[in-house]
Each structure stands twice: as C-alpha cells, then as structure tokens.
C-alpha cells in the first residue's frame, strides 16, 4: 500500500534549526534503507492553482493570502497498512515539532 504524506508549514517564514535537519536526515536514511521511502521532496511556496468552472479554466498564481499554512514537503511511502503509515507520520511530527501532516492512500499502478 502506498501513501502520500504531506507536511504543512506555517506561511510566516518558519525556519527550522540545524538539529531538525540532522534528525530528519537520519529518519530519511532509515526509511530509504528499509525500502519504505519511494520519494521525498520540498515544494515551492508559490503554487499555481487551476480552477475549472463551466468549461472555463482559470489560473491563479500564489502565494495565496488566505492560506495560513501551505504544503511544504511530501514523502511517498510503501507500507503494509494504514496504521504503519500513521506511525511513520507520528515519528515525523516528533522530529518536526508543532505542525500538521496529511496522509492519503495512493491508488493505481
């Protein structure tokens, strides 16, 4: 089962300390070595939003003023169960501290 884990970051310019990078590096190495981690990366803080309404597609450049948080990074993992994905999410948040993470199952090939 594959899951997409997305971490939300505050839009106020939060800058993590050096210890976070060290601990996150260890966590990523562990998941990579075990074969669980398929992909990971950070995301641009200036997204583009596409909206379709009545056949008309509108493109809006970010950042979006109404957003207090934005998805700042992701990890694509392959695990045996939803519970295992949640446990990895818990470990991630213990490293990053306060924040929010969203986990969604990925379907398809």
Image (tube, grey):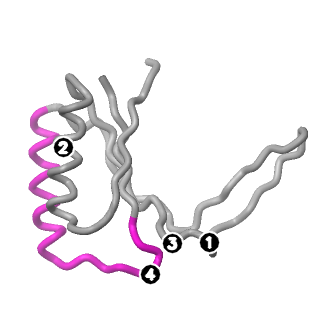
Q: Which residue is mark 2?
A: 88
* Pointers 1 and 4 in contact (C-beta within 8 Å): no
Is residue 16 found inside the magenta-colored segment of the image? yes
From this view, report whether residue 78 is shown above or below residue 94: above
Earlier residue among tags 1 and 4: 4
Q: Which residue is mark 1?
A: 66
Q: Position of residue 26 (x, y in %)?
A: 9, 55
Instruction: Determine the CA span between mark 2 and mark 4.
Output: 26 Å
Instruction: Determine the CA span between mark 1 and mark 2.
Output: 30 Å
The quadrant the C terminus occupies is top left
Span highlighted in magenta in the image: 9-34
Instruction: Determine the CA span between mark 3 and mark 2.
Output: 25 Å
92 to the left or right of 76: left
Q: Label for residue 12?
A: 4
Q: Residues within 10 Å of mark 4 (few under 14, many from 20)?
A: few
Q: Residues within 10 Å of mark 1 (few under 14, many from 20)?
A: few
Pair 1/4: label in front: 1
Instruction: Determine the CA span between mark 4 and mark 3.
Output: 8 Å
* Pointers 1 and 2 in contact (C-beta within 8 Å): no
Q: Chief secondary structure of the magenta span? A: helix
Q: Position of residue 5 (x, y in %)?
A: 34, 45
**Helix, strand or loop status at disc 2:** helix
């Amino acid at each position: 089962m594959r899951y997409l884990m997305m971490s939300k970051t505050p839009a106020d310019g939060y800058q993590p300390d050096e210890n976070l990078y060290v601990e996150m590096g260890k966590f990523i190495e562990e998941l990579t070595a075990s074969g669980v981690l398929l992909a990971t990366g950070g995301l641009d803080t200036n997204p583009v939003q596409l909206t379709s309404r009545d056949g008309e597609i509108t493109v809006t450049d970010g950042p979006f003023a109404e957003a207090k948080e934005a998805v700042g990074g992701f990890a694509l993992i392959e695990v045996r169960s939803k519970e295992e994905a949640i446990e990895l999410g818990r470990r991630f948040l213990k490293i990053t501290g306060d924040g929010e993470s969203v986990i969604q199952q990925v379907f398809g090939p």
